[in-house]
Structures are given as C-alpha cells and as structure tokens.
Image (spheres, coloured by chain):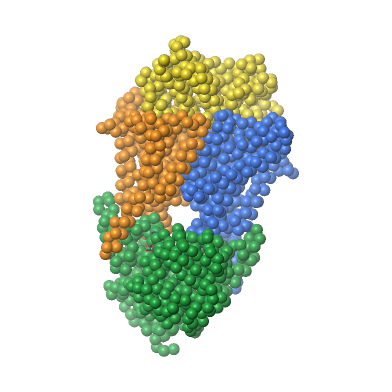
Chain colours: A yellow, B green, C blue, D orange
C-alpha cells in the first residue's frame, strides 16, 4: 500500500464573490479527489489576510510534512518568503493566480492574468466606442489584483481618445458600487460606458443605472465571469454583452494537476497561463457553471 | 437675646489664615451665595451652619478652588490669592474634604491618598512607604480599612474616612470639612473630633460644616450662620444647640422627636428568618409589626446595609424563610418587593440613589413609574404635579425645577430621594440613614413624617448611625455586630449607652420580653 | 417671581441649543457641498443621498437604544447580512406557493429572526455578563460566517418573480417621498416616542446613566438592556426589508463595516457612548452627515481616490470640533 | 492586631485569584487544543504561535495604557500599516548609501513616526475634546488612506538587499527564544513597570477610574491620556519593526482589523473597557488566546471553512463565560 499523501490548499477567505468562488471550487476539488484517490488527503484552509495566510502556512507545515502545497497568495511580495520556507522541506509547490516574486520556487504555476482582464476589456470597449467617449471606472479593494486590472485598463485607454472621467474604490461590494454609480451619474451628465472591474460591483452599477433612467450609457462591463453576468451575456444583453473570465475554478485545476502528480500519472511541472479571452454570447456556455455560487 | 447670641466682629482677633471678602456665586440668573465675608483664624475651629441649600458647600468650594467665585476675593495673610483649581489651593495649604465622596473607585486606599503626590524611590513609586504612611494616617483617624483595599469595595463610611485621611496626609494651614460625620457612626465621630482638635492644637485653621449641632457645640470656637446664601453673622463659642437652630432657621423650633406610640398587638408584617448575606449578615432574623418603628443600630461595618441590600435581592443572599403580610416571599427583587409593598431607601444617595445628571422630576418618578404614568405614554403634567407635591411635602429647597439632581444641595438630594421612594406608597419602608445631611429644621419634619406613617398602620425600619435619632425614633432597636443581630432593646432599655454597649461588647442584652407587642410605652 | 419665570423659560431653550449641534454640523456640510459642487444640490442627488442613508439611519435608531442603555452592538452589519440572507431564502422558498405574498411573510419572518438575533446578543451580555464589546464582536463573527456559509461564499439572489413586486419598497415613493425615507421617518418617530415618551425609554436612560441607581429603583437593568438589543435587532430587520429590493441579493459583504458607520452616526448625533443620553433625531442627522460626506467625496474632484478615506476622517473630526466649538 | 495581620495577608491573595481568569482561560484553550489535535502541542507549533502573537501582544500592551486611562484607540491597525510603509520607504531610500545600517535608522525613524501618530490621536482626543471612538475612527481612515496612497493601491516591498540582514529580527532567536518573543517580553516588562510601578501608571489608572477626582488631585488628565496614546504609537512602531521581516512588504490591507483583535485581547485579559484597571500580563494572555484559537482552527478539520469565524466567535464568548464562571 502506498503512503498517505497530503496536499494542503491555502486560499483567501470568502470575503466577496470571487474569493467565495475560490473556496467553493477548492472544497469541490477536495471532495472529488479524496473520493477518487483514497491515498490523497486534501486540506483546504482559508485565511482572511496575508498575515493570517503566512500563519496558516506555518501551522500546516509545523506538525506534518506536506507533500504538496497549492496556494493562492494574497500578495506576491508578502508570501514569497514563507512559501520558500515550506518548499525547503521538500514540499511540491503549486501557485495559483499571483506568481511569487521568485518564480524558481514554483513547481507549478497556474497564472491568472489580471492585467489582461483590464486590457482586454479596455480594447473591446475602445473599439466599440470608436475610440471616443467618456467612461467611469469602479475599482475594488486596494490590493495587487485590483491595481493590475486598473493598470491594464488605463494603459490601453491612454492610447485612445477615451477620457476616463473617474476611478474610485467600491471595495468589490455591490452596495458601495450602487452608491458610487449613483454619485457618478449625478456628477457627470454624460457617460458613455462604465467599467466595474468585478461582476459583483457590476450588479450594483446596473441597478443604479436602471433607477436613474439614463439611456446614454452604452456599455456597463464587469469582469470575472460571475454566473449572473454570464447569463446576461448569453441572453445578448445590449449593455453587458461581454465579460472577461477570471474563473475561480483555476484553483480546482491546480489542485487536480497537483493530485495527478501523486496518483502516479504524470509529473506536473511548468507554467499554465490562463488567458482572459472575452466571454461573448457565442462562447458563454463554456464559462457558465450554474452550480457554482459565483 | 443674651450676650452669647450677639455676633462678634473679627477685627479684634489674630491675623486670619484665610479671609474671604465679599464672596458671591451665581449659577446663571440664580445667586446662591452673596457677599460673604469671613475670617478663618489659625488655631480655631470655625463652624459654618445653615439650612439645607443655604450655600455652605458652595462657600467651601469657593474657598478651596473647586469653583470660581462670581465676585469677591480671597486673601491669605495680607496677600490676595486666587486658586485656579483645587490642586492650586492644596499646594497653598488649603484643602477641602468634600460632602460627596470624591475618590477613584478602582484604586486602592493608599493610591488614592497619594494620587498626584506619589512618593517615589528613583523612578519607582514607593508603595511600601506610601502604605506605611497611609496606615498611620488611617489609624490616627480611627479608620479600620487597609491601605491596599480597593476604595470601590469599601462601605461608604470607610470611604469618607479615606477622604479625610487624604486631606490630612500633609500639614495644612486651612482644613475645610463639609459634613464629615454625616456618614460616620459614634466611635468614628469621636475619633474624628479628636483629629480636628489635634489640628487646632497644631495651629491649623479648621472650617467645619455639620448638621449635628452637638458636634458644633462641642467643637467650635466660633460659629458662622448662613441663611439663603447670606451671612447672618458670626458668634463665639457658647451658643446652645437650640440657639443655633433658631439662628439657622430664623424661627422657633418645636420638639425634635415625636412622642412614642402605643404598640398595637397585631400579627407581624415582615418576618425574616435566618437571612445570610455575602460579606455581610449572618443568619439574621427579625420581626416587624405594622405600626412600629424598628431601629437598627451598630457600628460601621456591622453589616446593616448589607443585610437589607441582601433582603432586597441586591446582593447574593439566602434565607430560611421570609414572609410579608403572612405570605412567603420566594423571589426577592426590588421590583417584587415594591409590588408587595416594601421599599428600601439606600444610604448612598449619589452612587445608588439618584441619577445626578437627570432632572428632579425624572429622579422622583423613576421608582414609581407605573403608578405615576398609568398609560403607555409618560404623563409629563402628572409628573410635574408629583414634583410639586414632593417639593411641598418634603420641603425640597430648589430655586429652579430644571436643575439636575446633582446640582441640588446635599440635604435637598436626601429629601428628593426620600420623596422618590415614598412615591411608591409602600406599607413597609426600610430607611438606611434617613436624615443623612439634613438640617435640624427639616429633621423634625422627617421624624414627623415617619411618625405619621406608622400611625397610619405602616411599618418602618430605620437604620441609623445617629444614636439620638435611633433612640428618639424607635419603638424597638436591634443592634448588629459582625453581621449578627446581637441585641434587642425595647421600652426603657432603648438608651444610647445600651446601644453602644451592645454594638461593641456583643453580649446579648435581654432588655425586655421578645414580643414587642406585649409591651407598651410612651 | 419674575426671576423664576425667566429661569423656567430660559432653561429648556439652552438645552435645545446644545442639542442643535448635529443639525448645525449637517447644515454646514450641506452648505459646503452646495458651494463646492453644483451637482450636489440637485433634486435627484439629494433624493439619492437621503434614500441611501435610510439603512444606516434605521439601524442607528436601534443603536441609540443600545448605547443609551449603556451597551454597544458591533454585530449589526453582520446581523443585517444574515437577516437579509434568511429573508431571501424564505421568500424564494415560499414564492412558488404564495406568489408575491411571500414578500410579506418573508418580511415578517425576517422581523422575528432579527428580534431573535438581538435577543441572543442581549442574553449573552446580560445573563452571561460579558462586556458588550466582546460579546457582539463574537456574534459579529458568527453572523458573518453564517451568511458566508448560507451563500457558499457567493450570493443569495432573490427569485426573479419577486423582483418586480418587491422593487417599489426601495425605489417607490409616497407623495414624492422615497419609500425608504418614509420608513425611516416612521422608525424614527416610533423610536423617539419610545425613548422619550414611554416608561421603557426612561428606564433605558436610567440603566445607561447609572446602573446601580436603576437597580436600586427597581429597574431590571438586564431586562431593559436585553430589550434594547431586541429593538436593535428589529431595526436591523426593517433595514433589511428595505435593502433587499435595492440589489436583490445577500452576499458575504453585505453590511460590512456598517457597525462602525452606525456607531459614528449615533455619536455624531450627540448620544453619549458611555450611555445615559440618547438623541434619536441627532442620530438621523449623524447618518445624513456621513452619507453627504461620502457623496461629496465622489462629486468633488479635489482628492485622489486613494485619499478619500483620509479626507472623510478629517471632515468627521472637523465636524465634531465645529459642533464642540458651537456649544 | 491579629485581625489586621490576616487582612494584610488576605487582601492581595483574593485579588490575585480573580486576576487568574485570563490565564485559566488560556490554559483551558491550550488543554483543549492538546486533546483534539496531536500536532498542536509540538514544539515548532507552539513556538510559531507564540512568536506570531507578538504583534498583537505588543500593540495590546499600548492599548492597555490607552484603555486604562479611559480612552480607546481604533486606529492601531491602520497606524501599523502606515508606520510599516514609512519605515520600508525610509529603509529602501537609505539602503544604497548605508547598507544594512538603513534598517537601524529606519527603525528609529519608525519609532518617531509612531510616537507622532499617537501624539496626533492624543491631541485630537484631549485638546479637541472629541470622543476617542470617533477621533480614532477618523485617524484610522486617515492612516489607511495614507498607506493606500503611498503604495498606489498596491504594495511597498522592502529592498531585496535588506531582506537577509533584517530576517533574524523575526526569525532569529536568543538562547532558543524567538526574537519577537524576547521583544514582546521586554515591552511587557517595561509596560508593566510603567503601569504598576511609576507615578505615571498610577495617574493613568486614576484618570480612567474617575477623571474628575484625578483632576482635583492635580493630575493633568489631558497630559496623562496624550502620553498613553504616544505609548500606544511607540508600541505600534515596535510591532511594525518586528513585522517587516516576516512579510517583507506593506500593503493597504496590512494590519486590517487588528484594532478589534487588540481590543479583544485587552478585554479578555481583564482590563476594564471603561478604564481604571489595566492588566498587562492578562493582555498578553488575551493575545495568546486569540492566536491559539486561530491556530486550532487551521489545525483541526472539524469546521467548514465558511464557519471558521463563527467558531472563533463562539470560543471567545465561551472563554469569557468560563472565566466569569471560575470567578
Ligand atoms: N451647579 C449648580 N447650578 C445651579 N445651582 C446650584 C449648583 N450647585 C449648587 N446649586 C445651588 O446652590 C444652592 C446652595 O447649595 P449648597 O450645596 O451650597 O447648599 P448647602 O448649604 O451645602 O446645603 P446642604 O446642607 O443641603 O448640603 C442650592 O440651592 C443648590 O441647588
Ligand atoms: N464588596 C465587598 N467585599 C467584601 N467585603 C465587603 C464588601 N462590601 C462590604 N464589605 C464588608 O461588609 C461589612 C459590613 O459593611 P457596612 O459597613 O456597609 O455595614 P453597615 O453596618 O451598614 O455600616 P454603615 O454604617 O456604613 O452603613 C464590612 O466589614 C465591609 O468591609
Ligand atoms: Mg452641602
Ligand atoms: Mg450602612
């Protein structure tokens, strides 16, 4: 009989829609893999902050030797050292979404591309608006993810005649997005398009637009591929005809790839970069998971 | 009027330690003290007397920097002085022992005494030295608490002694006592009077306020009388208590205590069987009949307050059996007792009696909310009427009905508290220290009031540290010592000596048959 | 005699003046808003801001009770999310059989759940004798975890069929006054009545002012405080009822950090944090001040998005200072 | 005479017993931990937990001062982030010229900045006479916004060249005792000395117990409280110094919600939230309790990840109840 193998999964706590999705998919993966491979034990741990995540790494590796660690780091800088520490015990390291500042630590890297999320949305929007117009932007919580998306978006917009009227924080929170959008609408008599860098916020934006009765807003876009928004895309919504995937299920893929390592099928190493293709009515079905909470 | 009641002028006397000239104080439009000129001489005890609300405490606060005067000035020796705050007055050698307890409850006795002037050794506070010094001062004034006791856990009387100790920690030129003995019992009072005499002997100037005119008579070298915020005059020692009372009130006073009543032979109203209270009473049993005043005597710390707070369910306690009006009482809380017709009036009016920041009417009706306000809505008009009646009935001297309770003079607060408790129209009243801080003119009113209650068939328990009051008022006296009821005195046996003896010796005195109803006296 | 008359006439006026603080601060903030931004004083914007402030205002009315009784409730934001979640689940479950009536039944159920949540807080504080700060910090974690768990970390949307019939509760109006504002007014009036005109209100203030005095006066401090927590729970449920139609979902972020906003509104409104004094109308002014400041931050272009929180902090401190200065 | 002797011997013993509460609660939590999880009682795990509780413990020592003086500081978490950011920027700026010495100078500068932040809080509260809750809620926003602005919403990492020389400050040890624990011990000893053995400590408690009495006794309550806030600022800076080598960066989320943890630690430790009583060692026990609970949540697999916060809340309430029960 084979030894029991332990895969630890360290992810952010479910504080908003997207991280909620990550937790959901991680727990799904845990159930499925443990059912399929009795010799693999998956431990999922969530942490509400970078500090807590570092603590969790210490706790997980203190009492036992981990065979593998799948981690979605809060931030690259803060987690690099601690993950390196874990690796020094011979643990296999799979990093999801945000790469560590020292890429040599990562055995497996399933990368999200936040810059592309912003950039692709911006490209699509600029094209549809004909390179002219006024847009407002809602950003999330001040973190690296948010920063990269905004950077991707603004960099593209710089080369167009589109004016970004305003960028403010709405903390990836529907309510705050609703309020902020109401205020944008009061402040700017003409807005051509809105970008909320996350679909959670987009829902708040749409509600505010609907209530105001304003009709000049041609597009209101989000990101992340939340299932409610994908439903809108599938239905060919004129204001929200696209989204960008940033599937929380990437954690599940990473866990599966890591498990494959131990179920003896194949050594899994390397970088897997997830694209941020546009979700359009044509391909929306691919991105639609009706059972996912996100 | 004989010579002893003639005012004297201070000009002929030695140079004053502290002199007030034309001192006035007004709160908004109300003048509470006007144009008071007063000398306090080194080596004298100068008593200030006056009715409740006459302005005594206000005057003392002006003299000691706690409150700034509206007009007038202070002089020490020849030089005018101004005290921006109490600390400045203290460093000039003038200290006030407040009528209210002003101590930090979370700190220990020693810490309170030395607050703001801690002894240090290097960077450290020298707790040992401070404790030692505290113990000395406490012993010198006859206080029995420990330097390391937390002040908040001490009974009121001990707190008052701590406050006095605090004032006497350093040598002072002027020491002002504002009703220091109001919360003390006999032996502490005696010790305190010795302390005051000692201060005088050392050349300090002592200003002394008290409603206990026997103390004033025994102690004072000169007596100043205030009435309605004005000086009536200053008299040398030798005034009789009666003369002092007349000067204060401005009219002739009748007898202080009502005549004793005949005790009806009826079934007991309240029976307490073996009530024990945490940190207080031990298996105390007593019987109370309608139409009698039962006095409870004892030294400070004998557990009287604890016994009744325990009875009310305000402290952890257990009893074998308690009946009220023949029915067994199973659940004891202030609310249940009140519904059954029994109320308790606390001895600690500031801490447990009144909401100092709330207006008079709110305080008055707090306990009797349901009867004053029968509907869901508060009946403000009814409340005002109740206040009118209480002001009349209890002679609460208040110039502005919108003051908060904390702005009343001490004695008037006590009357308000009494009015508040009586508003519930109880059949049994337990009054802990009924006349604490009340002037002599009003005392007799309160005694009359208690008399009327029992004549109307109600029952009253009076817990009192004032022996004359206990003796003059009670039909029967129980004496407590160390948490136990050690003696029962009835009829002729109710004397100050017997109470003191029982309270200190602890030997049970069988001064009469146990059933008080079997005896009658006048 | 004349002096007595002037005193009686004078005293209440003086008291009123001190109580005006929050309203003066509100007027000041509005005035500044009008001056620095032309979009501020438009009807739509004012209506938006006032309507939005309804949630915090309603919850803060409850908090005024809790705080004046001498306690504190940090769990309101999480409780709000939890109650919202429970209500939506109930409504969705009932919709197939009851249709739009599910909204009514769900709302009623929400009120019960809110009251029970408040009761839980109250009992932990009074029977368990645990410092309210810690007790409600604990339940804050509990409620937040429950909504996260109920929603699997995602969101709990209300049934499509219920959206339209429910929508007017947030977006509708009565005689031009937005419905949430009407509800707020009703809650405030009832709250003010209870706090100022009933025996319970008296007892509440007494418990907060000096718990010992209250106890010695036969007031059951524990019962008074527990009731205050229950009132708080009901207010949270009322806010939740108005909230659902706005975005139609409960998520783990619903109501996040509202507890701080609520307490700030109450304190800005002139209620003492240590208890014994409650100012319901001041609380409403406090809630409006917070919402107006947030609105002005977006409307004006003067501050970097990064510094919005800083400016907000500064303005709140300045408003408190101004208020103190006016006194 | 004999009665006096027994009193002297009796009084302190009674006080000690009540003060044991937090330690008993800690022992209880540790015991439970040992029983339910075999990994819990391992040396490495215990060392990790203790080391990591250093941050909260150090800051909570400062909070013990602020709270016993009768105030409250909600800004510590944000202040921590801000000070961390300033220190990292300073160190990075100095590194090219000074090399590893930049760490020393940066740390010194951090202490000054921390003290100034505390001073700001203190002055707003004492000179501005604003309720500490509101004042520090305001500065909480301000510090948080400043770190967000300094990091442009991203993060401020420390220079690679400084990582290695700085590392031992968190990961090193003295005679086997982790350095942060040594620092915590030093802070606690100094804190206990100041609070229990100096004039200042006495006055701090007096100001919290009854500010009026303190004032009458010639204690400048404003100065005492301002000093408490400065001490708090220094503690935050010390925590920041130990924190940087652990995570190597400051971000806008650094120290988020630490204020709540800090206050919880202080209150669990037996300090009264209304002031007048401070328990430095209890505070440390409180910080350890919180960290052990969090550790157990990670080690044990009994609860759904969504419910971790709920279980934590329940355990804190139970620990408080147990503590009360033992009393
Ligand atoms: N802060 C205040 N505002 C308004 N009136 C006040 C204030 N403080 C005291 N007074 C009033 O001043 C008057 C004098 O009060 P003071 O306390 O000096 O009386 P007193 O002679 O000490 O009486 P007692 O014997 O009852 O203690 C009272 O009518 C009281 O109501
Ligand atoms: N919280 C407490 N913990 C321990 N002992 C206490 C506490 N409160 C009171 N005591 C003790 O209980 C005893 C009785 O107290 P107390 O002095 O109040 O009785 P009393 O006869 O009513 O005196 P007083 O004349 O002050 O009313 C004293 O020995 C006191 O020290
Ligand atoms: Mg007086
Ligand atoms: Mg007593």
User: Residue A243: x percent and y percent?
Assistant: 61, 21
Q: Quadrant of the N terminus of chain A?
A: top left
- Residue B126 visible in rendering: yes
Residue at 67% of width from left, 42% of height from top?
C108
User: For the image shown, how many numbered marks are present on the structure?
Assistant: 0
Residue sticking out furthest to the top:
A266
Residue at 40% of width from left, 17% of height from top?
A3
Who is closer to the viewer here, A23 or A127? A23
User: Residue A73: x percent and y percent?
Assistant: 46, 24
Q: In this view, does D320 lie above or below B134?
A: above
* Rendering quadrant holding ligand 2: bottom left
D212 to the left or right of C60: left
User: Residue D58: x percent and y percent?
Assistant: 37, 39
Q: In this view, does B153 lie above or below D53?
A: below
User: Residue A180: x percent and y percent?
Assistant: 60, 33
Who is closer to the viewer here, C264 or C67? C67
C60 to the left or right of B35: right
Q: In this view, does A112 lie above or below B173?
A: above
Who is closer to the viewer here, A123 or B287? B287
Residue at 57% of width from left, 76% of height from top?
B456
Please tell me in which quadrant of the rendered image residue B146 appears: bottom left
Residue sticking out furthest to the right:
C175
- Residue B101 visible in rendering: no
Who is closer to the viewer here, A15 or A182? A15
Residue at 49% of width from left, 20% of height from top?
A34
């Amino acid at each position: 009989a084979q030894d029991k193998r332990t895969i630890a999964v360290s992810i952010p706590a479910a504080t908003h829609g997207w991280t909620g999705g990550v937790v959901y998919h991680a727990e799904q993966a845990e159930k499925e893999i443990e059912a399929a491979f009795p010799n693999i034990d998956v431990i999922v741990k969530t942490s509400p902050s970078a500090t807590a995540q570092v603590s969790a790494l210490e706790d997980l590796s203190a009492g036992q030797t981990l065979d593998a660690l799948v981690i979605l780091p809060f931030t690259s800088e803060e987690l690099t050292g601690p993950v390196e520490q874990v690796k020094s015990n011979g643990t296999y390291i799979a990093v999801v979404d945000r790469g560590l500042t020292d890429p040599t630590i990562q055995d497996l890297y399933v990368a999200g591309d936040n810059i592309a999320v912003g950039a692709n949305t911006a490209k699509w929007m600029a094209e549809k608006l004909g390179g002219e117009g006024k847009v407002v932007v809602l950003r999330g919580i001040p973190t690296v993810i948010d920063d990269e998306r905004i950077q991707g978006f603004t960099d593209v917009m710089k080369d167009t005649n589109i004016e970004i009227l305003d960028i403010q924080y709405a903390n990836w929170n529907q309510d705050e997005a609703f309020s902020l959008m109401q205020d944008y609408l009061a402040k700017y008599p003409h807005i051509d398009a809105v970008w909320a860098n996350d679909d959670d916020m987009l829902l708040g934006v749409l509600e505010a637009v609907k209530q105001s009765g304003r009709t000049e807003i041609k597009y209101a876009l989000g990101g992340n591929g939340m299932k409610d928004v994908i439903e809108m895309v599938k239905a060919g919504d004129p204001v929200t005809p696209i989204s960008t995937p940033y599937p929380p299920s990437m954690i599940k893929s990473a866990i599966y790839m890591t498990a494959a390592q131990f179920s003896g099928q194949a050594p899994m190493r390397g970088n897997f970069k997830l694209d941020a293709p546009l979700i359009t009515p044509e391909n929306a079905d691919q991105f639609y998971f009706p059972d996912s909470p996100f | 009027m004989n010579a002893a009641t003639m005012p004297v002028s201070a000009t002929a006397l030695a140079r004053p330690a502290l002199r007030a000239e034309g001192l006035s104080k007004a709160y908004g439009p109300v003048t509470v003290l006007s144009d008071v000129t007063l000398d306090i001489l080194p080596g004298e005890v100068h008593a200030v007397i006056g009715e409740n609300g006459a302005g005594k405490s206000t005057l003392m606060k002006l003299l000691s920097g706690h409150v700034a005067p509206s007009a007038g000035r202070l002089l020490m020796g020849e030089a005018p002085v101004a005290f921006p705050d109490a600390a400045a007055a203290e460093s000039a050698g003038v200290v006030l022992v407040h009528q209210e307890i002003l101590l930090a409850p979370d700190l220990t006795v020693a810490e309170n005494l030395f607050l703001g002037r801690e002894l240090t050794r290097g960077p450290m506070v020298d707790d040992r030295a401070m404790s030692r010094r505290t113990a000395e001062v406490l012993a010198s004034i006859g206080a029995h608490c420990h330097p390391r006791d937390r002040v908040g856990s001490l009974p009121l009387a001990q707190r008052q002694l701590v406050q006095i100790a605090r004032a006497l920690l350093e040598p002072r030129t002027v020491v002002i006592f504002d009703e220091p003995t109001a919360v003390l019992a006999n032996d502490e009072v005696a010790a305190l009077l010795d302390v005051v005499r000692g201060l005088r002997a050392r050349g300090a100037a002592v200003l002394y306020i008290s409603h206990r005119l026997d103390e004033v008579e025994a102690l004072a070298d000169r007596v100043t009388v205030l009435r309605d915020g004005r000086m009536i005059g200053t008299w040398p020692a030798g005034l009789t208590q009666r003369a002092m009372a007349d000067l204060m009130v401005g009219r002739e006073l009748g007898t202080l205590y009502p005549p004793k009543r005949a005790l009806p032979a009826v079934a007991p109203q309240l029976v307490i069987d073996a009530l024990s209270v945490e940190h207080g009473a031990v298996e105390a049993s007593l019987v109370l009949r309608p139409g009698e005043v039962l006095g409870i005597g004892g030294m400070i710390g004998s557990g009287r307050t604890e016994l009744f707070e325990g009875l009310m369910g305000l402290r952890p306690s257990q009893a074998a059996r308690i009946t009220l009006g023949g029915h067994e009482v199973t659940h004891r809380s202030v609310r249940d007792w009140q519904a059954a017709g029994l109320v308790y009036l606390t001895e600690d009016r500031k801490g447990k009696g009144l909401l100092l920041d709330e207006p008079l009417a709110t305080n008055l009706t707090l306990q009797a909310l349901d009867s004053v306000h029968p509907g869901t809505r508060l009946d403000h008009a009814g409340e005002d009427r109740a206040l009118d009646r209480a002001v009349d009935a209890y002679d609460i001297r208040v110039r502005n009905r919108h003051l908060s309770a904390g702005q009343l003079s001490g004695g008037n607060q006590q009357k308000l508290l009494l009015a508040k408790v009586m508003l519930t129209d109880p059949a049994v009243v337990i009054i802990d220290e009924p006349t604490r801080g009340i002037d002599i003119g009003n005392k007799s009113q309160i005694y009359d009031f208690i008399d009327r209650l029992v004549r109307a068939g109600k029952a009253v328990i009076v817990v009192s540290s004032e022996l004359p009051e206990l003796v003059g008022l009670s039909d029967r006296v129980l004496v407590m010592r160390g948490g136990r009821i050690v003696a029962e005195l009835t009829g002729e046996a109710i004397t100050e000596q017997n109470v003191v003896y029982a309270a200190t010796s602890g030997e049970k005195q069988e001064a009469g048959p146990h059933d008080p109803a079997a005896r009658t006296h006048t | 005699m004349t002096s007595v008359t002037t005193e009686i006439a004078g005293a209440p006026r003086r008291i009123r003046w001190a109580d005006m603080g929050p309203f003066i601060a509100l007027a000041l903030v509005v005035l500044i808003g009008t001056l620095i931004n032309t979009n501020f004083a438009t009807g739509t914007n004012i209506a938006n801001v006032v309507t939005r402030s309804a949630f915090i205002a309603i919850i803060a009315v409850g908090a005024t009770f809790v705080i004046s009784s001498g306690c504190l409730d940090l769990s309101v934001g999480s409780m709000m999310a939890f109650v919202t979640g429970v209500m939506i689940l109930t409504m969705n479950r009932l919709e197939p059989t009851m249709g739009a009536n599910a909204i009514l039944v769900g709302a009623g159920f929400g009120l019960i759940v809110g009251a029970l949540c408040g009761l839980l807080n109250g009992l932990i504080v009074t029977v368990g004798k645990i410092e309210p700060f810690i007790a409600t910090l604990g339940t804050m974690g509990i409620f937040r975890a429950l909504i996260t768990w109920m929603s699997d970390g995602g969101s709990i949307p209300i049934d499509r069929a219920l959206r339209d019939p429910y929508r007017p509760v947030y977006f509708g109006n009565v005689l031009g006054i937005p419905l949430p504002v009407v509800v707020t007014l009703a809650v405030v009036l009832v709250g003010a009545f209870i706090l100022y005109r009933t025996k319970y209100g008296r007892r509440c203030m007494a418990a907060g002012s000096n718990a010992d005095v209250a106890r010695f006066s036969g007031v059951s401090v524990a019962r008074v405080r527990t009731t205050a927590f229950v009132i708080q729970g009901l207010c949270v449920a009322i806010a939740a009822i108005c909230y659902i139609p706005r975005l139609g979902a409960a998520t783990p972020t619903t109501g996040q950090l509202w507890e701080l906003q609520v307490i700030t509104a109450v304190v800005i409104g002139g209620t003492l944090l240590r208890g014994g004094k409650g100012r319901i109308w001041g609380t409403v002014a406090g809630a409006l001040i917070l919402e107006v400041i947030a609105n002005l931050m977006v409307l004006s272009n003067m501050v970097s998005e990064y510094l919005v929180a800083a400016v907000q902090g500064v303005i709140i401190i300045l408003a408190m200072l101004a208020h103190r200065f006016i006194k």
